Image (cartoon, rainbow, N blue to C red):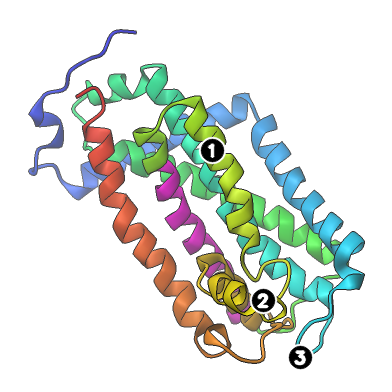
Amino acid sequence: MSTIRTSPTQTSPTRTLASTARESWLVTGRDLRHWLRDPWTPVFGMAFSVMLVLVFGYLFGGAVALPGGGDYLAYLLPGMLALSMMFGVESTMAAMATDSRRGVMDRFRSLPMSGVAVPLGRALADLLNSAVQLAVLMGGGLLIGWSVSGSLVDAFVAVGLLLWLRFAVLWLGIFLGLAFRSEGAMVAVQVLVWPIGFLSGVIVPPETMPGWLGVVADLNPVSATAAACRELFGNPSGITEGLLADHALLLAVAWPAVLTAVFVPLSVRAFRRLGA
């Protein structure tokens, strides 16, 4: 497909927030219709997350002793919820890269749309998909014995923190998909997501790791969200000291805010520079 050059009027500063929101929602609807026609990708994504819970909960759970005590399955579930939010980065990156290679982005850029509308529409569509995935994973956890002992309000706050992390990670995926569109780059990201996700407090408490590794795991944004959710759900934290013991909630809000502040402008810039 030939490249379509855009005109400066596409990103006119006179464009209103209302028109940008309407254009973003149109892009969101387009992405959601794709999933309705091909639902297997999100279905397999949900099944994969449930499988991970079963593998780690039943195969390895008996070998993990939590600092401070507590049931391992209750510790694991909030961590897996946070990890499933992080795993969205590669699917978002792949979708954006595929649309770029097929010329779909060039078609969008040829229309009088805001430079924010296309990446924001993609982020909203993936966030809705993530909310469904989160509900399925929480339902599966409740079926195998996970319980929430915190208040209903705290539980909703925990879900909000999980989606907040997902929203931030989505923008990372959007930026990577627009900036690095080759299949080699996507494979590299898919490989790196695993060690980065596991180098956290998701599967085992950082206090059980070697000292320097525990510090790195504490600084992982996924660890902050997992620790905050455990606190809000009333589950064992696996933490007796350290940064997350006192500031998990603050860090669970701050880390995604930093990621969003960095990657939203980078994504918009990368979208505007496509075909340049």
- Please provide the residue range marked out in magenta: 154-174
Pointer 1 and pointer 3: residues touching (CB < 8 Å)?
no
Q: Which mark is residue 68?
A: 3
The residue wearing badge 2 is: 210
Task: Work out whether 193 lies above or below 186.
Answer: below
Query: What residue sits 76% from the left and 91% below the top?
Result: 68
First reached walking from the N terminus: tag 1 or tag 3: 3
In the picture, the quarter occupied by the C terminus is: top left
Check the picture and name the quadrant holding the N terminus: top left
Amino acid under disc 2: Pro
Residue 76 lies, with reference to residue 23, above or below; the image says below
Residue 73 located left or right of residue 224: right
Residue placed under numbered mark 1 in the picture: 188
- Sort mark 1 into few (<14), some (14-19) or many (20+) by Cα contacts within 10 Å: few
Instruction: State whether residue 254 appears in this view.
Output: yes
Q: Quadrant of residue 271?
A: top left
Q: Position of residue 11 (x, y in %)?
A: 14, 36
